[in-house]
Structure formats: C-alpha cells, structure tokens
Amino acid sequence: MTVPPAANPDAKLTARQLALALGVTPQLVNTWHTDGYLTPGGDRVYLPEAGRNWKGHRQFRYLDAAKAEAATRRSARSHRKPRTAEEWAETDRNASQVAGRQQCA
C-alpha cells in the first residue's frame, strides 16, 4: 500500500507524480523549477530539486511543490487537466466565451 503524498510532505516525487497529486501538468512542475513562480508578494521563487531517482529524473519535495501550486493557484488552474465530463464542458464553455469576445473586438 502506498502512502498518499499529502500524508508525507517530505516525500520525494518526480514531476509526473507531483502533477498527478496536485492536478497540474508535469510541464508546469518543471517550469516552477527552471523559470520559478511569483509569490503573491511579487518575489520570484524556484522549486528546489531534492535529488534524482535511479533513472536520473529530478525529484522534488511534495511540500515545496504544494507551496508553488498554492502561490500560483489562479494560473495553475488554467493548466489543470479536466477530470470529469462536467469539467470538460466548462472548459468548452470558457473557450467559446473567449472566442466570442475576440470576434466582437
């Protein structure tokens, strides 16, 4: 039985594992590491690497990634993958509203 990452905030996870746990894409996790993210106070913070696994993939602490997700929650939601039919429908509605606004302008 595996322990969920939230139960162990010091767990070292790959970008893919963190993405699944936080509901974002692996690319966003890597962006937090390479380009950093802005905190609500306007400071740029980088997601620190906690080591490498046996395959050579970067590993990050769950707690650090959760802090990054919380600090960028508004923009992180735009990177979230829809999980249910309702979320897909909402994504389609939002996209059509944006397209409608661009046509009117």
Image: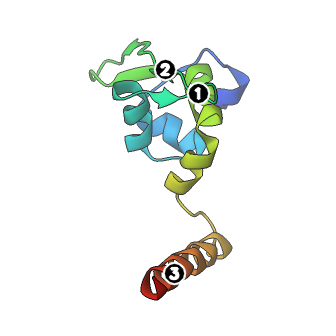
Q: What residue does disc 3 label?
A: 101
Q: CA distance from mark 1 to mark 3?
A: 30 Å
Residue 40, position as x, y percentages in the image = 63, 30
At a point 45% along the width and 47% down the height, the residue shown is: 25
SS at badge 3: helix
| Front label number (1 vs 3) | 3
Amino acid tagged 2: Val
Dot placed on the residue nearer the N-terminal end, 1 or 2 = 1
Q: Is residue 86 visible?
A: yes
Q: Quick one: 74 or 20, which is closer to the camera?
A: 74
Residue 63, position as x, y percentages in the image = 62, 21
Q: Which mark is residue 19?
A: none
Q: In which quadrant will I find the N terminus?
A: top right
Disc 1 to disc 2: CB gap under 8 Å: yes
Q: CA distance from mark 2 to mark 3?
A: 34 Å
**In the rendered image, the vertical position of residue 16 relative to residue 105, given as above or below:** above
The quarter of the displayed image where residue 29 is located: top left
Residue 83, position as x, y percentages in the image = 60, 63
Q: What residue does disc 2 label?
A: 45
| Front label number (2 vs 3) | 3
Give the left or right position of residue 8, taking residue 46 as reference: right
Amino acid tagged 1: Thr
Q: What residue does disc 1 label?
A: 39
SS at badge 2: strand
